[in-house]
Image (cartoon, grey):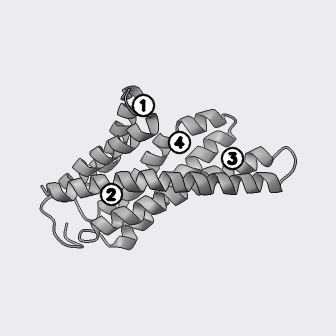
Amino acid sequence: MDWAFGFLWWVVSMTALFFGGIIALFIGFGSAGGIGNAIEGMIEGVAAYVAFWTIAPLILTAIVGIAQAWLLRQYIPIAHWFSATVAGGAIAAALIGGVGLLGDRTLGVDYSQIAAWLGTAIAQWYVLQRYSSRAFAWPLAAIVASAITWFYPIAALPPSLQSIVLYGIVTAILIMLIFSGRSSVGRA
């Protein structure tokens, strides 16, 4: 296994998630606030909610997707990984918005991390399976990482930072296993 690649994946993924999260929050809140202020009446809160939970996952996954795609360029075409990651953000946005619009916005926010991880993992798995027979584990890793973060919090870290660190560790190990022995685009 390529441990240097795994370490680089871990650092790049965590950095992209952290700074991408900050950027996504600022743009998401700004856009949602603008939309909420532009719409008067009973639906302004709903419009702001939908705007935020549509924009934030898409921006975050675009930032993470391009950072990870750059690392994976020797295994997968950049456009494939980037597109899959942003598609995952769209899946997450739909899941979060759908649950929130059903009446429980708190539930939508509480499960936003799991929705983002699973939505993105499913879309990325679709691409990964074309390049590695070991790709089946990718969505399973998202489920395991979500469960660990949800049920066994690390007391020393805030929940968001726990998720970022855990995502980095789990996906770094898994991406090393998926591509161990592979060296070029298109080889499976």
At numbered mark 4, what does the secondary structure look like: helix, strand or loop? helix
Residue 82: image quadrant is bottom left
Q: Residue under label 4, please give it.
A: 112
Disc 4 from disc 1: Cα separation: 12 Å
Q: Residue at x 45, y 61 (%)?
A: 63
Going by the numbered disc 2, the residue's amino acid type is: Val
Establish if 7 lies above or below 109: below
Question: Which badge, 1 or 2, is on the more N-terminal residue?
Answer: 2
Placement of the C terminus among the 4 image quadrants: bottom left
Q: Residue 49, labelled with which disc? A: 3
Other-residue count near label 1 (Cα within 10 Å), few / some / many at <14 / 14–19 / ≥20: some
Q: Residue at x 55, y 35 (%)?
A: 110
Disc 1 from disc 2: Cα separation: 23 Å
The tally of labels here is 4
Q: Nearer the viewer, residue 113 or 120?
A: 113
Going by the numbered disc 3, the residue's amino acid type is: Tyr
